[in-house]
Amino acid sequence: MKNILLTDDLFRGAVSLEHTSEGIKLWRIPYQDYDLYPPNGIDNKAAICAGIRLSFHTDATAVVVKFSPMAEAARLDCLVNGELFAATGITAGDTEVAFSALDQGPKELAIFLPQNTSMTISSLWMNRTRNYG
C-alpha cells in the first residue's frame, strides 16, 4: 500500500477544509467564520460530513482511509462508477476503513463520509497509485 498525498481536490461537497496537525477536517461552513454560526457552529452540526466525499479516478483494487478516532458510530459508503460497492460501519474509536476486492482497471471511486458526525481524514492509502483525470 502506498500513501497518497491528500490534496483539496480529492474532496467534494465540503464548503471548507481545515488543515490541522491531525489531517484535513471537513466543514459545511467556512470554518474561519465559525463564530458567525452560533451556538457552537449551529449546535455542532457545521462539522458533520453529510454529503462530503472523497472522489477520484484510480486503478487500485484496495483503498484504505485513515482518520482521527471517531467520536461515535457511523457509516461510509463506497461507490464505484456511481454504483454502491460497499457500506461499511465504523464504531466509536475506529481510525481506519478499508475497501478491497475492487474491480481491476480504471474506475471512479467516491467514498461518502458519515452523515451523522464529523471526521478528520489523516491519510489515504492505495495498492496502486496510478490516477486517471
Image: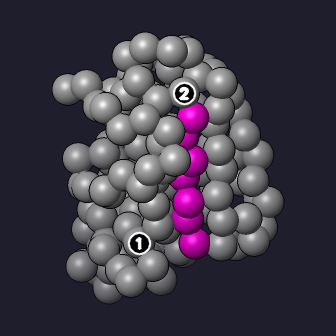
Residue tagged 1:
23
Q: Residue at x 57, y 47 (%)?
A: 64
* Left or right, 32 with reference to 126: left
Q: Is residue 102 above or below residue 95?
A: above
Q: Is residue 118 above or below residue 38?
A: above
Q: Could you say which disc has been placed on residue 133 in the image?
A: none
Residue tagged 2:
61
Secondary-structure class at tag 2: loop
Q: Quadrant of residue 7?
A: bottom left
Q: CA distance from mark 1 to mark 2?
A: 24 Å
User: In the rendering, at what x and y percent does residue 63 appear?
Assistant: 54, 40
Q: Is residue 18 above or below residue 9?
A: below
Q: Quadrant of residue 69?
A: bottom right
User: In the rendering, at what x and y percent does residue 72 appear?
Assistant: 74, 66
The amino acid type, in three-letter code, at marker 2 is: Thr
Q: Residue at x 75, y 53 (%)?
A: 90
Judged by its main secondary structure, the magenta piece is strand
In magenta, the rendered stretch is 62-68
How are the colours assigned in the image? Answer: one colour
